[in-house]
Amino acid sequence: MPVVKGPQVFPRSEYLRRLTAANARMAERDIAALVITDNAHVTYLTGSVAHSYDTRAVVVLASREEPVFILRWMDVAAAVQETFMERDSVVGYSEELMGDPEKNGYDAVIDFLLEQGLGQSGIGLELCNLTVDSVQKFKSRLPQSRIEDFSNVVTRIRAIKSDLEIAVMREAAAISDAGVLRAAEVMRSGMREADAIAEIVGTLARGANGKPGTWIATPFLCATSRIGNPHTTWSEDTLREGSQVNLEIAGVRHDYHVPICRTYSLGTPSDRLLRIHEAQLAGLEAGLNIIHAGAVSGEVAKIIHSTTEKHGFKKQSRAGYSIGINWMEKTTSLKLGDTTVLEPNMTFHLHLGSWVQEDFGYVLSESIRVTESGVEVLTKAPRQLFTLG
Amino acid sequence: MPVVKGPQVFPRSEYLRRLTAANARMAERDIAALVITDNAHVTYLTGSVAHSYDTRAVVVLASREEPVFILRWMDVAAAVQETFMERDSVVGYSEELMGDPEKNGYDAVIDFLLEQGLGQSGIGLELCNLTVDSVQKFKSRLPQSRIEDFSNVVTRIRAIKSDLEIAVMREAAAISDAGVLRAAEVMRSGMREADAIAEIVGTLARGANGKPGTWIATPFLCATSRIGNPHTTWSEDTLREGSQVNLEIAGVRHDYHVPICRTYSLGTPSDRLLRIHEAQLAGLEAGLNIIHAGAVSGEVAKIIHSTTEKHGFKKQSRAGYSIGINWMEKTTSLKLGDTTVLEPNMTFHLHLGSWVQEDFGYVLSESIRVTESGVEVLTKAPRQLFTLG
């Protein structure tokens, strides 16, 4: 039997809003079809969160309200259930294209464009996601088309969230908070790091306030000899009296990731640990104090850097980045010199983390939303260095 | 203080074996430097399993025993700890390259190649992982170099595992088995799917036989209205009497993923469910019976397809794929017409999964190793349709 629609996260009007914005960019450049290949953009424009291990693309047509989702036949049922679109907007391609050295799903996309009579039109591609071979395939099979790069177009639309998206991000933030508190509850001397992770990822799945997590973003848990690393997972070690744990996790709802970092000390923290906590806390609060619609990204970074430096710790990395679908959005960084003017409903991971020596670092962060007058802190776990018994 | 090496998964000789194989391919094509950008290949050649959200590359030089790992400065400590290489083989690039519209980590790689005097040499790139812009950067900054595509070179070396790798994959397989059994233990009518997932991912973290999981591969749990989907995760629903659950998970050790699929019935299974289980079981066993070094991939697929078809179910998708680092290796598919001759210590996910209608599918699989005389089944969970009370 054919499948029917599953529950929808957003109403149709939300997707049409996003598509209208994409269509406006297409109209400016006389583009008849925009071929979306970035996975986060596919999710953004359709509602699909299922995975597909093969070529898939969403084609936004200037002439059609709904986009057309082209993917491997076995993933069609999930696309019909998850997306806001009618069944005839989902097109499966044959299994024969799997593992064929000459042909792949992009041939199905190009076939579709040709069937639509778009062989001489403007075609937008996300070149930042396409390999040389794929781009060559589009150029050679569409020799009369004018191909334009739309790499950063949907990313920029995504940067400003609707209130509906913010509501989902608040749900994800509550899961992040639950994960931070669960870590504080269970981490004790003598426990394997992996057993702590089991409790944390269990919490990320169970969720908060009756809203389960919908994906497991594997946590970074950097303890003791690895606290100078930002991006390693747990080890096979056991936590000990005196261990420090830098934890970075994200609750996920419908692919919206809301990250948070907290640091834990098993036993009395060292003086250096207390001082770097104070420095990062001061920097974080200074940043929160000046963020508002109209503030400039680089200026926010500047006050964060100068505040932590006043407290004796120089922060080398950027002070945050745009968040949304898939943890990190490649739009605005809160970094020195960045001239982006903040707008309401931009969302950031404000990340004070600092790896000051190869064997020492500290993490503290919040996920936030820019408001007209200031900031909403989405994550609400206690902003402290957790000292565990 | 500078960090020191952490525990090593493989001895230096194992990495040198892999590099020797890469060097042989380089010598055949007179390549002085091979620039590795595929994440799985980076792991394979160095031992690094940390993540880095920015450009990183491993440069294999014809003139040097150890490769050179070039990555963002903040990820250097992790690289020093995790990889088999000496400290001077790890090179960090400046934070200033982050978010720079003109420059990125590939500029650091090209600078390195020029410093090594390789501006007029043969350079191997993995074009399948590089965007048009990145390739253009290499070409324009190395105009005298002869650039050759090494896209599938390391993948093919990876396809045949050493006994050391097989030992790690057995550890991962035991975790997969534990996940399957935990699911059978906890899934009951009235339980939210997310709560079942919490137990399963907890098990994937805790591991088996004292060996923790080292990464959480988010499971696919497709229940009831979504059992026609291969690649969706759990929903916000609650399991009910009569629910069917198709579960696909993978235990992970040091990035080696060993997948397994099992299906569960809450309450008495339907006749159709019993019949498709019998069909897939017969197909799986027929495949296992003919796999051995020297067998041809497409012939294995053929017997699997014909056996399930004899039992009344036509399998449309391929019968398996090569596994190793990162779940799926893009080398051999067990698919009709594939002419690959199987070799000892090739490893596959032998996947009988079949989505016969949009609202009905069934999954059963094993991860296996090809041996001289036959096959070693790595996953050992009961090969049954689990009927849960």
Image (spheres, coloured by chain):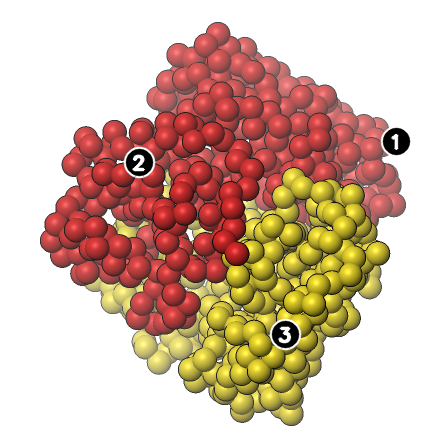
Chain colours: A yellow, B red
- Tell me the number on the disc at residue B269: none
Q: Amino acid at mark 3?
A: Gln
Looking at this view, is B349 or A111 the one in front?
A: B349
Q: Residue at x 76, y 64 (%)?
A: A386
State which chain disc 2 sits on. Answer: B
Instruction: Tell me which numbered mark, 1 or 2, is placed earlier along the sequence.
Output: 2
- Disc nearest the viewer among 1 and 3: 3
Q: Nearer the viewer, residue A184 or B369?
A: A184
Distance between mark 1 and mark 3 Cα atoms: 52 Å
Both marks 1 and 2 on one chain = yes
Q: Chain of mark 1?
A: B
The residue lying furthest to the top in this view is B373
Residue A85 appears anywhere in the view:
no
Q: Nearer the viewer, mark 1 or mark 2?
A: 2
Residue A232 visible in this rendered orientation of the protein: yes
Amino acid at circle 2: Glu
Would you say A54 lies left or right of A118 here?
A: right
Q: Is the N terminus of chain A in the top left, top right, bottom left or bottom right quadrant? A: top right
Mark identifier at residue B65: 2
The span from disc 1 to disc 2 (Cα, nearest Å) is 58 Å
Per the image, label 2 sits on a secondary structure element best described as loop
Residue B275: x and y, percent? 70, 22
